[in-house]
Image (cartoon, rainbow, N blue to C red):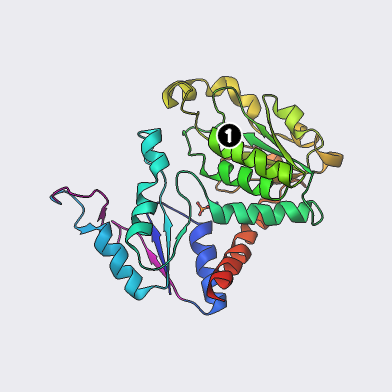
């Protein structure tokens, strides 16, 4: 029994986990705290006289008696970067559960998405990603999104030894600790991680352009200031012209989904020969099934 605990919405993660469990003969329980199961208090030592009738301590301990694995999705609150980095929801489950806890995305990573991305990047590279150019490009978005997905892309591209080109405007740099570790890991595997300010240069000759919106880094202006800059950053939206700069003009377009058409990427790209986003999403089920098997066997 896999206990899925979703604090935030999901299409791919929820259904691919459920499908992987079904194919392996496991049962997936889909809990949404506050919507059909009790809202959870996460803070310790506070009188529980607010909206949440159950504490995460009891919830994690009790769920551990029914489920063999807990799988938790919790997006960052976005109030304070340091608070987000502490990943209190995921860590509270890890602390109080007596069974393994799997992250289905938190503030600093989306490991199952990262595994699926590594799978499709290896396919695109013909099996061996080492030394192959991959462009991870920042994209405009009306909301200031977490860095979880791009940080997992960086980690997994480094594991595969890719030449990863991270393209982003100044002020939107990715978490420096993760980048530094990825540079070391990539170097050990024949790859490297470089930052570009020009998305065209980063896309040139790449086997894939992976687009993702993420919020400004902690040293940059506030999210509101960043949003006000978005119109001038429209040229970061991925279009057919940029895709034609890729390897043999036929590099793949990747995105973890959901994606905002006409904001992050043009319809022409998603409907064109470049798009592999559906194949990428399909990889989620396979890597998660493999993850469950590796843990069971
Ligand atoms: N890529 C991804 O995690 O999709 P969902 O948010 O729909 O689960």
Mark 1 highlights which residue?
A: 263
- Residue 40 magenta-drawn? yes
On the picture, is 191 further left or further right than 136?
right
Of residues 167 and 291, the one drawn nearer to the viewer in this rendering: 291
Q: Is residue 37 visible?
A: no
Other-residue count near label 1 (Cα within 10 Å), few / some / many at <14 / 14–19 / ≥20: some
The residue at 39%/73% (across/down) is: 67
Of residues 20 and 238, the one drawn nearer to the viewer in this rendering: 20
**Which residue occupies the extreme bottom position in the image?**
25
Helix, strand or loop at label 1? It is loop
On the picture, is 283 further left or further right than 35?
right
Quarter of the figure with residue 171: top right
Residues drawn in magenta: 27-47
The residue at 60%/24% (across/down) is: 169
Q: Is residue 172 visible?
A: yes
Q: Position of residue 103 (x, y in %)?
A: 47, 56
Quarter of the figure with residue 82: top left
Q: Position of residue 287 (x, y in %)?
A: 61, 63
On the picture, is 47 further left or further right than 205?
left
The residue at 46%/28% (across/down) is: 218
- Residue 13 magenta-drawn? no
User: In the rendered image of this protein, does residue 76 appear above or below residue 228?
Assistant: below
Q: Position of residue 232 (x, y in %)?
A: 58, 19
**Which quadrant is home to the C terminus?**
bottom right
């Amino acid at each position: 029994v896999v206990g899925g605990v979703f604090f935030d919405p999901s299409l791919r993660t929820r259904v691919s986990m459920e499908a992987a469990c079904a194919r392996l003969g496991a049962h997936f329980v889909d809990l949404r705290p506050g919507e059909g199961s009790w809202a959870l208090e996460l803070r310790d030592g506070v009188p529980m006289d607010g909206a949440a009738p159950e504490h995460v301590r009891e919830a994690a301990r009790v769920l551990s008696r029914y489920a063999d694995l807990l799988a938790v999705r919790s997006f960052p609150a976005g109030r304070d970067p340091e608070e987000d980095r502490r990943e209190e929801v995921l860590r509270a489950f890890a602390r109080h559960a007596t069974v393994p806890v799997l992250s289905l995305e938190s503030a600093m990573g989306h490991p199952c998405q990262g595994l699926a991305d590594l799978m499709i990047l290896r396919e695109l590279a013909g099996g061996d990603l080492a030394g192959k150019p991959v462009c991870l490009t920042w994209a405009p978005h009306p909301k200031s999104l977490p860095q979880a997905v791009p940080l997992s892309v960086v980690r997994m591209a480094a594991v595969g030894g890719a030449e990863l080109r991270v393209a982003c405007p100044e002020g939107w740099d990715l978490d420096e600790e993760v980048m530094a570790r990825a540079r070391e890991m990539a170097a050990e595997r024949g790859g490297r991680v470089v930052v570009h300010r020009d998305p065209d240069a980063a896309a040139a000759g790449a086997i894939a352009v992976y687009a993702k919106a993420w919020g400004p880094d902690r040293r940059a202006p506030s999210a509101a200031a960043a949003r006000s800059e978005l119109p001038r950053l429209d040229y970061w939206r991925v279009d057919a012209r940029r895709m034609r700069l890729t390897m043999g003009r036929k590099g793949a377009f990747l995105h973890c989904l959901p994606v905002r058409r006409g904001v992050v990427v043009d319809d022409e790209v998603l409907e064109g020969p470049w798009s592999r986003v559906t194949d990428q999403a399909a990889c989620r089920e396979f890597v998660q099934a493999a993850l469950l098997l590796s843990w069971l066997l």
